[in-house]
Image (tube, grey):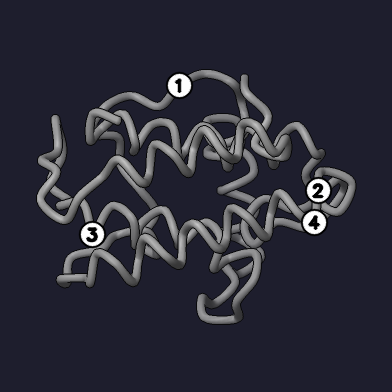
Amino acid sequence: MKNIFQSAITGEVISRINNLTSSTPQLWGKMNVAQMLAHCNVSYELVYENTHPKPNAFMRLIMKVVVKNLVVSEKPYKKNSQTAPAFVISDQKEFDNEKARLIAYINKTQELGETHFDGKESHSFGKLTKTEWNNMFYKHLDHHLGQFGV
């Protein structure tokens, strides 16, 4: 899997994001492009913002046992996979704002680097290795950018 912590890969992902327009159609799924960008921002909000409540101990256990491997492994997501409630974006979003936020989050993540993330506590899965963080970030972005053909 490509390493989102490497500046060349960060640049590649940002270039793909910059190929999107506010009217880029999805190839599958229900979200429009602005909603998809907002959806991708949630991954970073969980790391950098205090806007989403932490799951209780029981839910964290369920997430670790049932969901964690799907999220942090190298196995690609299936099209139209279910998502956690915090990631459901049903209201309209402003494309340019969501795009700028996502690019800023990706740059911040790359600048902090993989050492910063190695052993860092995840909102839902407990401590993750730098490889698990990379897989989670990159795979999610790649999946949704592919959803919009970029």
The quarter in which the C terminus is drawn is top left
Residue 10: x and y in percent read: 60, 40
The mark that comes first in sequence, 1 or 2, is: 1
Residue occupying the point 89% across, 46% down = 115
Note whether 116 is above or below 13 in the view shown: below
Note whether 2 is above or below 120 in the view shown: above
Residue 65: x and y in percent read: 62, 38
Of the pair 23 and 146, the residue shown nearer to us: 23
The mark that comes first in sequence, 3 or 2, is: 3
Q: Are marks 2 and 4 in contact (CB under 8 Å)?
A: yes
What crowding class fits label 4: few (fewer than 14 Cα within 10 Å), some (14-19), or many (20 or more)?
A: few
**Residue type, numbered disc 4:** Leu
Give the structural element (helix, strand or loop) at label 1.
loop
| Closer to viewer: mark 1 or mark 2 | 2
Of the pair 65 and 23, the residue shown nearer to us: 23
Identify the mark at residue 113; answer none if there is no mark.
2
Identify the mark at residue 34; answer none if there is no mark.
3
The mark that comes first in sequence, 1 or 3, is: 3
Q: Is residue 115 left or right of residue 86?
A: right
Residue on which disc 1 sits:
76
What crowding class fits label 2: few (fewer than 14 Cα within 10 Å), some (14-19), or many (20 or more)?
A: some
The mark that comes first in sequence, 4 or 3, is: 3
Give the structural element (helix, strand or loop) at label 3.
helix
Residue on which disc 4 sits:
112
